[in-house]
Image (cartoon, rainbow, N blue to C red):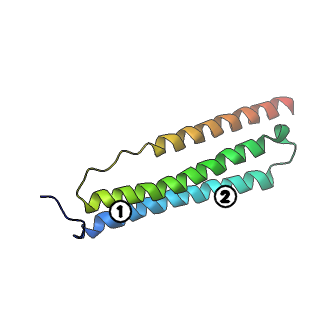
């Protein structure tokens, strides 16, 4: 039986979807906080201004995270209300890849700074 759009789904699914959306927003907020911290607390000439590049990457990941969270919330809400399969989500892989790149760059910079004094 196909559920009509006017039927309300089990509230637990709707609330779980909302909690997932809020987790995406907390992730974006954490990335923005890391961006600000990187710009404010890393000395200006640190490894020739790499903090600007890293903060830009973190800021872009924050934007992707918040936008993807909203999009995912809408897609899942629609799927729940229409009794459809949940859509596939590639954003966690993108976010993980971006954070891995940032982590790798920061690690290399830390080694370079330790070696050079």
For residue 3, which quarter of the picture? Answer: bottom left
Horizontal arrangement in the rendering, residue 47 relative to residue 2 (left or right): right
Quadrant in which residue 89 is drawn: top left
For the residues bearing labels 1 and 2, Cβ distance under 8 angstroms: no
Residue 30 screen position, x and y as percent: 60, 57
User: Residue 45's quadrant in the figure?
Assistant: top right
Crowd around label 1: few <14 · some 14–19 · many ≥20 (10 Å) = few
Q: Mark 2 points at which residue?
A: 33
Number of the label disc, if any, that sits on residue 81:
none
**Circle 2: element type:** helix
Say whether residue 83 is left or right of residue 91: left
Residue 97 drawn above or below residue 34: above
In the rendered image, the quadrant that contains the N terminus is: bottom left
Screen quadrant of the C terminus: top right
The answer to which of 7 and 46 lies nearer the viewer is 7
**Residue 34 percent across, percent down from the top left:** 67, 53
Q: Which residue lies furthest to the left in this view?
A: 1
Separation of residues labelled 1 and 2 (CA atoms):
26 Å
Query: Which residue is at 28% across, 59% downward?
Result: 80
**How many marks are shown on the rendered structure?**
2
Q: Where is residue 75 in the image (x, y as percent from the top left)?
A: 37, 56
**Secondary structure state at the residue bearing disc 1:** helix
**Which residue in the structure is indicated by mark 1?**
16
Q: Position of residue 92 (x, y in %)?
A: 47, 45
- Residue at left 35%, top 67%? 15
Identity of the residue drawn at 35% across and 56% down: 76
Mark 2 Cα shell of 10 Å, populated few (<14), some (14-19), many (≥20): some
Image point (29%, 56%), residue name: 79
Q: Which residue lies furthest to the front in this view?
A: 5
Ranked by sequence position, the earlier of labels 1 and 2 is: 1
């Amino acid at each position: 039986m196909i559920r009509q759009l006017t039927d309300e789904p089990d509230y637990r699914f709707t609330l779980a979807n909302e909690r997932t959306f809020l987790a995406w927003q907390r992730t974006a907020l954490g990335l923005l906080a890391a961006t600000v911290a990187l710009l404010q607390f890393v000395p200006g000439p640190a490894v020739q201004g790499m903090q600007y590049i890293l903060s830009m990457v973190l800021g872009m990941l924050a934007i992707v995270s918040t936008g993807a969270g909203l999009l995912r919330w809408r897609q899942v809400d629609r799927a729940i209300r229409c009794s459809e399969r949940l859509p596939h989500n590639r954003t966690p892989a993108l976010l993980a890849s971006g954070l891995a790149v940032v982590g790798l760059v920061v690690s290399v910079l830390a080694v370079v700074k330790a070696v050079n004094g």
